[in-house]
Image: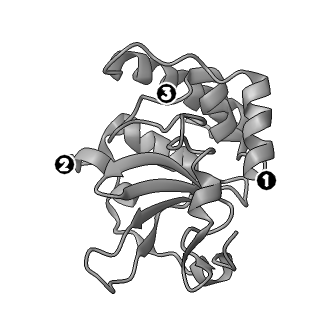
């Protein structure tokens, strides 16, 4: 099968993801984010969302579908992806931020774990954040997927979430440590 041009492949992914989300949602899908909401989110966040992430929120739903607790809504009284971001990059201790700049939390997994998208590039590298489990233990940031598109594909085929036999080998590969973390943590606030 010939490879689809980038926009056609993205359109196909959005179409398939919308159908999958509608079929697997625990409840009715949340309304999509209006263009004004997307613009406000980018203004508050300080960076444009990667194009595919913008389309997911604007064409499929503003949160609530997907694995874990589902895609995090952009705004939701203190725990939305965007409205929680300023506090995340605020001080944790010693005047240094604990959450890297330009990284948007998009999926809460429970126990403080999150999937987050690095919004500094168009691919939207997906990161896995795990807080230090014990006092003094370091937080862990891993690259879960090099691209948002690949990560969303893994939602639909279940390879990342259920580890099905025969799933794509790339999705089963273990994550690697995110080497950009130190450069992205800066002075708090």
Residue topped by disc 1: 46
Residue topped by disc 3: 17
Q: Is residue 124 visible?
A: no
Under circle 3, the secondary element is helix
The answer to whether marks 3 and 2 mark residues whose Cβ atoms lie closer than 8 Å is no
In three-dimensional space, the C-alpha distance between marks 1 and 2, rounded to whole angstroms, equals 41 Å
Left or right placement of residue 68 versus residue 51 in this view: left
**Considering only order in the chain, which callout, 3 or 1, is on the residue closer to the N terminus?**
3
Within 10 Å of disc 1 (Cα), the crowding (few <14, some 14-19, many 20+) is few
- The disc placed on residue 157 is none
The residue lying at 38 percent from left, 82 percent from top is: 138
**Considering only order in the chain, which callout, 2 or 3, is on the residue closer to the N terminus?**
3
Q: Is residue 142 above or below residue 147?
A: below
Q: Is residue 144 above or below residue 70?
A: below
Tell me residue 96's x, y (percent): 61, 81
Q: Nearer the viewer, residue 37 or 3?
A: 37
Tell me residue 185's x, y (percent): 63, 77
- The disc placed on residue 165 is 2
């Amino acid at each position: 099968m010939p490879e689809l041009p980038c926009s056609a492949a993205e359109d196909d992914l959005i179409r398939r993801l919308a159908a999958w989300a509608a079929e697997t949602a625990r409840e009715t899908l949340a309304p999509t984010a209006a263009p004004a909401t997307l613009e406000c989110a980018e203004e508050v966040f300080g960076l444009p969302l990667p194009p595919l992430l913008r389309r997911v929120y604007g064409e499929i739903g503003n949160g609530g579908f997907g694995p874990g607790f589902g895609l995090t809504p952009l705004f939701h009284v203190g725990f939305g992806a965007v409205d929680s971001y300023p506090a995340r990059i605020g001080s944790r201790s010693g005047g240094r931020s604990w959450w890297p700049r330009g990284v948007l939390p998009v999926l809460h997994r429970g126990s403080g774990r999150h999937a987050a998208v690095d919004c500094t590039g168009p691919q939207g590298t997906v990161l896995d954040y795990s807080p230090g489990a014990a006092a003094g233990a370091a937080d862990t940031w891993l690259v879960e997927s090099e691209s948002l598109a690949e990560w969303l594909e893994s939602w639909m085929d279940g390879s990342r979430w259920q580890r099905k036999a025969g799933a794509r080998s790339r999705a089963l590969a273990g994550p690697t440590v995110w080497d950009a973390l130190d450069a992205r943590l800066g002075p708090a606030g």
